[in-house]
Structure formats: structure tokens, C-alpha cells
Image (spheres, rainbow, N blue to C red):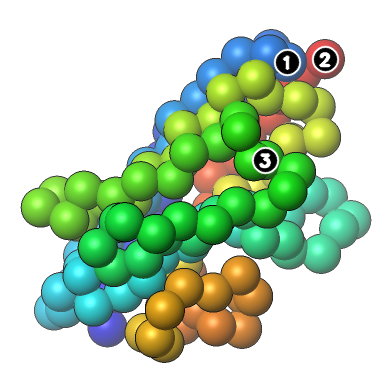
Amino acid sequence: QVQLVESGGGLVQAGGSLRLSCVASGRTTFTDYAMGWFRQAPGKEREFVATISRSGLIASYADSVKGRFTISRDNARNTLYLQMNSLKSEDTAVYYCAASTRPGIGINDYEYHYWGQGTQVTAAS
């Protein structure tokens, strides 16, 4: 089992940047998991943001963040990142990292088995 803890959220002006981190711990190996970022805005369903393969060589993004957000991982540090640039007010949400034991990468939340507690991101217009 793996425990996930996000950090790096906060309040930023629209157009600004933030970098989220997610540290994995537990009696497990970080490279056993494909990783993903999801977000949930008030009154909305949780939605996919980005995912990355175990090696870090393959990534996929939601169309709404493509070209602005970058997902990466440091397997030596058991850490997942989300670099968010050119933030918009519609990016405001609680951001969650998640770990999946399924083969490949996934864009659906049901494909992920472990979740962090979330970190709030607010982009003020």
C-alpha cells in the first residue's frame, strides 16, 4: 500500500504559475505505479488532468490543460510533480494525486487505487 501527500497549492493571480508535489511513502516501490493528477471544482465532478507512466517517458493531458501543465516524476525521490503555468480562473479546484497498479496509464478515476488528501489551487482573475 502507498500513502500520497500533496503540497504546493495556494492562491495565485490568473496568468501565474504553481508547482504541485506529491510524495509517496509506504512499504512499496514508487515505480510499481502509474501516477495521475485529478481535480475537483466546487459543485463539479472530479476530472482528469494528467497522467504519467512508471518510467516517466509517457504522459497524457486533458485538452483543457495541454500546453500549460506539465506532469513529471522523480522516481529516486518517490515524488510526482505538476507544473502549472498560465493559470486561469477555471483551473481553480482541489487537486489530487493518485496511484494506479493497472498496466499502462489511465485517464479515468476508477483506474486509480490510492489517493492523496488534495491541495487547493485558486487562480484569481
Q: Residues within 10 Å of mark 2 (few under 14, many from 20)?
A: few
Residue that mark 3 sits on: 65
Mark before the other along the chain sequence, 3 or 2: 3
Q: Residue at x 39, y 86 (%)?
A: 103
Q: Position of residue 60 (x, y in %)?
A: 54, 57
Secondary structure type for disc 3 = loop
Which label belongs to residue 103?
none
Q: Position of residue 119 (x, y in %)?
A: 54, 45
Q: Residues within 10 Å of mark 3 (few under 14, many from 20)?
A: some
Q: Amino acid at mark 2?
A: Ser
Which label belongs to residue 125?
2
Q: Position of residue 23 (x, y in %)?
A: 28, 53
Mark before the other along the chain sequence, 3 or 1: 1
Q: Are marks 1 and 2 in contact (CB under 8 Å)?
A: yes
**Relative to 52, is 21 above or below?**
above
Q: Is residue 120 left or right of residue 4?
A: right
**Relative to 38, is 19 above or below?**
above
